[in-house]
Amino acid sequence: MIREYALNPDVVVSDINILQRFFAEFGADKGRVLVDVPQKWTDSVRQGVQRLGLKPVARSKCILLLERIKKQGVSPKSSVPMNAGDVWLAKVLASPAVADLHAILDQQAEDDPKVFSYLNMLGEAPEDWDLGQTESVERRAETMAAAVSTSLRLARTLHLVDPYFDPTDDRYRIPLLKFIEEIGKGRVGLKKLVVHTVEQARDRAAPKNRAEIERGLVEHVQPCLPAGFQVDVWIRTPNAMHDRFLLTDMVGYSFGHGLNEVAYQASLKVNINRLSEDGRSEQWKIFANPQGRIYEPLTVVGG
């Protein structure tokens, strides 16, 4: 539900209208992120903004918006430095992220089918340019992971939030492992994720308490983990969580019916909603914070 693009910073600051359009279109919460070419891409745009002759208020707003892009709009592990005289497009094609690019946005289109003119998107635009905030997918591990695959591959930190998570239940275990598989396909090299859940005692014969969660992690999850990959479970108070989320340092999603697979007809699809940055930030402050845990984390690492 997000795409990676290369965007020539000189194009962004070529006109105030293009700059305004850029701020409206880019950022992980809008479904579009940038590779860092040239290295410190936002600094290049900031320098160009200074040359646009904007009034102080407008210039200050641009700087604030660029800071947000820097934090939630520039892909990790994608930087390529540029020197005077270097050709931007050639440097993009040398980026470690080039294979992951959905499109390259330059001054003008090229014969390369991936290169488009950002100055004229009315004539021709990349496929799937307009991404919705919500996608409805089958509640299968493969389809849920595919919907957020780019976000998983770019994550430097990842929190999964589901009060019903149960590592002994394949409905939860298989999607978790599929998410980890997608992480492994990325260039970032994330080696840890955190699952947030709660204890439940509704089934007295098989209560989901801390001991059972730990047993499930050791017996059902750890043997399936890639070597060196760590899964932590933070148990929180039952009234501290209800909704289900997938939160990274760049983007967040709510999973309407949960992060688990189902096989019954009434819930064959789940609505995955990409959060606004304000929404992601609000949940991040809650779940990236160890305050609210009621025990020390449960941890397993792949051997």
Image (cartoon, rainbow, N blue to C red):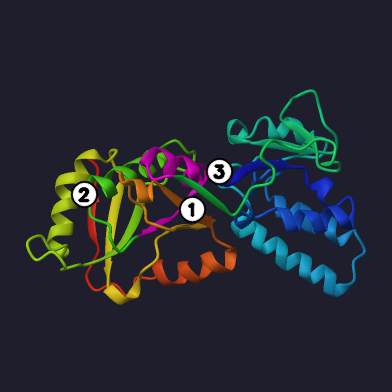
Residue 158 belongs to magenta span: yes
Residues under labels 3 and 2: Cα distance? Answer: 35 Å
Amino acid under disc 2: Asp
Q: Earlier in the sequence, mark 3 or mark 2?
A: 3
Q: Is residue 196 above or below residue 106?
A: below
Q: Is disc 3 in contact with disc 2, using a CB cutoff of under 8 Å?
A: no
Residue 170 appears at what percent x and percent y?
A: 24, 45
Residue 132 belongs to magenta span: no
Residues under labels 1 and 2: Cα distance? Answer: 22 Å
Q: Secondary structure at mark 1?
A: strand
Amino acid under disc 3: Lys
- Residue range corresponding to the magenta coloring: 138-161
Q: Is residue 244 above or below residue 183?
A: below
Q: Which residue is mark 3?
A: 77
Q: In screen coordinates, is 186 left or right of 88? A: left
Q: Residue furthest top?
A: 111
Residues under labels 3 and 1: Cα distance? Answer: 26 Å
Q: Residue at x 39, y 57 (%)?
A: 257
Q: Which residue is mark 2?
A: 169
Quarter of the image holding residue 290? Answer: bottom left
Q: Which residue is mark 1?
A: 272
Q: Residue furthest front?
A: 266
Q: Earlier in the sequence, mark 3 or mark 1?
A: 3
The answer to whether residue 47 shows anywhere in this view is no
Residue 232 appears at what percent x and percent y?
A: 28, 57
Q: Is residue 193 above or below residue 58?
A: above
